[in-house]
Image: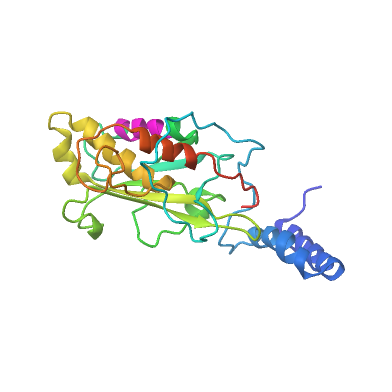
Amino acid sequence: MVLHPRMVLRTAVAVAVLLGLYFGTALLDRHVAPVVEASLPWSAVPPQGIEAAAQPLGTPPVAEESEAYKLLEPPDSSQPFTAYDPCRPIHYVIRPDGAPPDSEALVHKAVAEVSAASGLQFVYDGPTDEAPSNSREPYQPDLYGKRWAPVLIAWSSPAESPRLAGDVAGLGGSSTVRETGTPYVRVNGQIDLDGPDLAEILVEPYGPDRVQAVIMHELGHVLGLGHVEDPDQLMYGGPNSVTELQDGDRAGLAVLGSGACVPQL
């Protein structure tokens, strides 16, 4: 017998009410309400545990000991850092409008480098027409289905993304969420790349390496790395000639690849 979705929803609500009456509101708030909320058509969060495995999908490699990295501050000061759930893949899409020729391969190479250094597993979902936004929603079921929206890597310009003006070649960051009793977790991110600027760099000597370095730098921000003052690191906050992950970058990414698995989200 196949139940109509409305019947399933009514049943879930009825069960939630009965459990709340029997066991009290603590159980209802912590365990039942999130499940029911995610089932509602207007929910702002996806159903719990989508793609969550029982164990991390990868393991961070043993990195050379270094303190030349900085982790972005979490919303909760009692939490040492925020990271992506290592028990789930990180999906990403590319908005190709304004992309320099042959630049897609550089994006995938940058993702592969960061994945190898962190142990986090990435999945490419293909191109998208979603435009970058300072107020991007972390959950977009109409566009990406009932899971957290993927990391958006968008080729853009200062006209579309004003924060790319001047010497800024890229921007990167992530959204964090948490459920009651769980740590904050990064669930999706966005990278804006200055297409016109990077197209000029691409044709210069060692241009592809430099463009790939910009993408890796922004992926570092997406995963939770901040700027450092050491100019020999890729995550240095100013201009430098570094085009590969260095000891501090790798040490920081290894930490970020060891975050908690949170199937409650």
The scheme the figure's colours follow is: rainbow
- Secondary structure that dominates the magenta span: helix
Camera sees residue 229? yes
Q: Is residue 180 magenta?
A: no
Q: Is 75 on the left-hand or right-hand side of 159? A: right
Q: Position of residue 233 (x, y in %)?
A: 29, 38
**Looking at the picture, how far across and down is residue 203, in whole percent?**
14, 32
> Looking at the image, how many numbered discs can be counted on the residues?
0
Is residue 110 shown in magenta? yes
The picture places residue 144, in percent across and down from the top left corner, at 49, 49
> Residue at point 58% right, 54% down?
183
Question: Looking at the picture, does residue 241 appear above or below residue 164?
Answer: above
**Which residue shows up at 15% across the image and 38% down it?**
201
Closest to the observer, 47 or 228 = 228
- Foreground residue among 250 and 21: 250
Left or right: residue 121 compared with residue 157: right
Q: Residue at x 28, y 47 (%)?
A: 229
Quadrant in the rendering for residue 4: bottom right
**55, above or below 81, in the image:** above
State the image coordinates of residue 95 (x, y, percent, origin top left): 33, 45
Point 20% across, 36% down: residue: 241
Q: Is residue 125 among the parts visible in the rendering? A: no
Hey, which quadrant is residue 37 in on the image? bottom right
Image height of 150 relative to 105, above or below: below
Residue furthest to the right in view is 22
For the residue pair 19 and 114, the one nearer the viewer reads as 114
Q: Tell me which segment is drawn in magenta.
A: 105-114
Q: Is residue 225 left or right of residue 201?
A: right
